[in-house]
Amino acid sequence: MSAEKIPHLLQKAILPFTIEVKTGLHIGGNKDELEIGGVQLPLIRTTRNGQIQPYIPGSSLKGKIRCLLELASQKFNDFKNPDNGDNDIITELFGCREDKNEEKIIHPGNPSKIIFRDAHIQTDNNKEPILESDSIELKTENTIDRFSGSAKNPRTQERVVPGTVFKSEIVINVFDKKGKIANNILKEYLECLCQGIVLLNNDYLGGGGSRGSGQVLFKFSKKKKDDNLDKDDNLDKMENAVAIAHKLAATCDIIST
């Protein structure tokens, strides 16, 4: 690749956030052996601070937010409509794969400019690590035959208990874009991201959302007490998204290159 084609990274924006679980959260993991009477739908887990704990993969957050944005905008990157490709802010921010056939590259693809870190359970530094048993509940579900009224196919799933708070961060890479001011590019990306978070806060994360699971509250974290990002600036309404995006652009940590 020639030097003139290498994208110029201008800055990185660091955006810490929390996710509070409002109703039991289920993001599924693998179970090697199915025990009789055991849990059919286990949670995904990792080892953190010496304890096995559930967590929220960054890929789950990124995929859900992108999906909601595409559903709302009706812009899906299918490589067939140029307006849904490079000119679309969702594709520009979240990226898309290369599309090619045996003869040539049809679309070069677009690397993602946003990084979602895995989210881990927030703990007080002065307290012991949260035990797995303190953060997980079991929920049993059935399929009801509406003609006979009988229950079929009982299954048990693990869920993260309501009130659990996860914390993590998002990193946005800002590249040179035809001479545009870096902060203006960041504002465009943050407006898109905040709109996606509003949709998430009014939808669900993980599985079983239509049956009550997965309601969450995503909030960006304040860096210090005098930040102008107020604690009441909740991303629960679409009309709040742009204003909060612009506040974030002015207050978030920036690493300039």
Image (tube, rainbow, N blue to C red):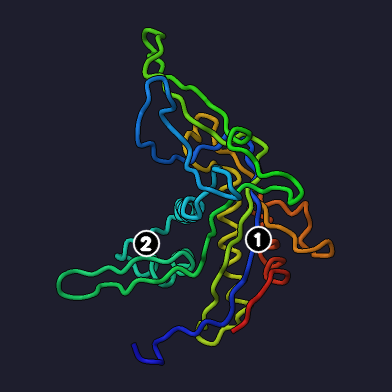
- Percent position (x, y) of residue 193? 57, 60
Q: Residue at x 55, y 55 (%)?
A: 196
Image height of 220 relative to 141, above or below: below
Of residues 230 and 87, which is closer to you in this image? 230
Q: Residue at x 41, y 16 (%)?
A: 144
Label 1 packing within 10 angstroms: few (<14), some (14-19), many (20+): some
Taking the view exactly as shown, the residue that stands out farthest to the bottom is 3
- Percent position (x, y) of residue 35? 37, 25
Q: Which mark is residue 16?
A: 1
Which residue type does callout 2 highlight?
Asn
Which residue type does callout 1 highlight?
Pro
Of residues 117 and 107, which is closer to you in this image? 117
Of residues 38 and 242, which is closer to you in this image? 38
Secondary-structure class at tag 2 = loop
Secondary-structure class at tag 1 = strand
Taking the view exactly as shown, the residue that stands out farthest to the right is 226
Distance CA(mark 1)–CA(mark 2) = 28 Å
- Residue hosting label 2: 77
Image height of 213 relative to 63, above or below: above
The quadrant of the rendering that contains the N terminus is: bottom left
Image height of 33 relative to 242, above or below: above
Q: Residue at x 37, y 15 (%)?
A: 152
